[in-house]
């Protein structure tokens, strides 16, 4: 039994030495892995500074985001921007974000600097429902400062490949103040789906109602708007009442509805 225990200890020490040597030889790769692991640890209670510690004070980065429709969004970041993004992740208990290293496509390691290009997959969840998944091509530059490796540059191309919840767009067409048609574009997996819906403001047994082909909203004289007995808004404007109804109907797919 003692021999087995001793053998396991020797194996453990040997493996630890091997990984430590590998880490010493590839600090830029270790920096990338530290970044990925610490981002993932945020949902398990890790602190913002655990991530920020990896970034140099003069850090700069940029992201080109390609959404499902193919539109491009470009953003530049410094360390303060990274800090704000981390606050958003940490302060939203319903939001989780995960990164996974797929593969390293290029790596160059020098004594005091390193460059790594990697394919990283990402998933984000809202209320445990998949909000978005996709792939990032990440080009990271690290330097050795006071015996510690820091990220000084990180350029990313981020491509969304699937999305079940996110921003939606609604076009509204009205015929007076009682009849409306909406055209809503909402994320649905690999693409955006579109749905047309007609709304009619009418009265039944003295009560004012907003009706679609399958749903019914109660609109009180004081402006209170209700769906299945639950308040969903307060307005005396017909157009705003329809917008509140749309937001309620698409609440499972839309974190925000943009009305045009």
Image (cartoon, helix red, strand yellow):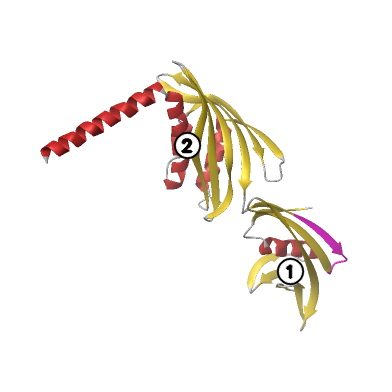
Which residue is denoted by mark 2 in the rendering?
A: 36
Percent coordinates x, y for residue 200 in the rendering:
80, 71
x 61%, y 37%: residue: 158
Real-space Cα separation, disc 2 to disc 1, in angstroms: 49 Å
Q: Is residue 177 in the magenta section?
A: yes
Q: Is residue 88 in the magenta section?
A: no
Mark on residue 131?
none
Percent coordinates x, y for residue 24 in the rendering:
37, 23
Instruction: Out of 207 and 158, give the one closest to the viewer.
Output: 158
Q: Which residue lies furthest to the right in this view?
A: 176
Q: Is residue 56 above or below residue 218?
A: above
Mark on residue 223?
1
Range covered by the magenta-colored residues: 170-178
- Secondary structure beneath dot 2 equals helix
Q: Report the predominant secondary structure element of the magenta stretch.
A: strand
x 52%, y 55%: residue: 128
Q: Which residue lies furthest to the bottom in this view?
A: 205
- Which tag, 2 or 1, sits closer to the chain's start? 2
Instruction: Out of 243 and 163, give the one closest to the viewer.
Output: 163
Does residue 49 appear in this view? no
Split into 4 quadrants, where in the image is the N terminus? top left
């Amino acid at each position: 039994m003692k021999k087995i225990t001793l053998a396991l200890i020797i194996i453990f020490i040997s493996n630890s030495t091997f990984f430590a040597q590998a880490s010493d030889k590839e600090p830029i790769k270790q920096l990338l892995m530290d970044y990925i692991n610490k981002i993932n640890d945020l949902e398990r209670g890790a602190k913002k500074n655990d991530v920020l510690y990896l970034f140099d004070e003069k850090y700069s980065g940029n992201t080109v985001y390609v959404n499902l429709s193919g539109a491009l969004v470009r953003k530049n970041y410094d360390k303060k921007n990274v800090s704000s993004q981390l606050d958003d992740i940490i302060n939203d208990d319903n939001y989780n974000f995960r990164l996974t290293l797929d593969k390293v496509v290029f790596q160059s390691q020098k004594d005091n600097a390193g460059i790594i290009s990697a394919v990283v997959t990402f998933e984000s969840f809202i209320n445990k429902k998949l909000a978005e998944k996709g792939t990032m091509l990440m080009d990271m530059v690290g330097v050795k400062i006071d015996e510690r490796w820091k990220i000084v540059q990180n350029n990313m191309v981020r491509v969304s490949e699937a999305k079940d919840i996110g921003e939606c767009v609604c076009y509204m067409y009205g015929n007076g103040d009682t009849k409306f048609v909406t055209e809503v574009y909402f994320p649905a997996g690999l693409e955006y789906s579109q749905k047309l819906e007609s709304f009619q403001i009418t009265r039944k047994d003295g009560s004012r109602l907003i009706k679609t082909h399958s749903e019914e909203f109660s609109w009180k004289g004081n402006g209170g708007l209700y769906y299945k007995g639950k308040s969903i808004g307060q307005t005396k404007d017909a157009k705003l009442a329809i917008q509140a109804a749309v937001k309620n109907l698409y609440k499972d797919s839309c974190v925000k509805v943009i009305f045009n």
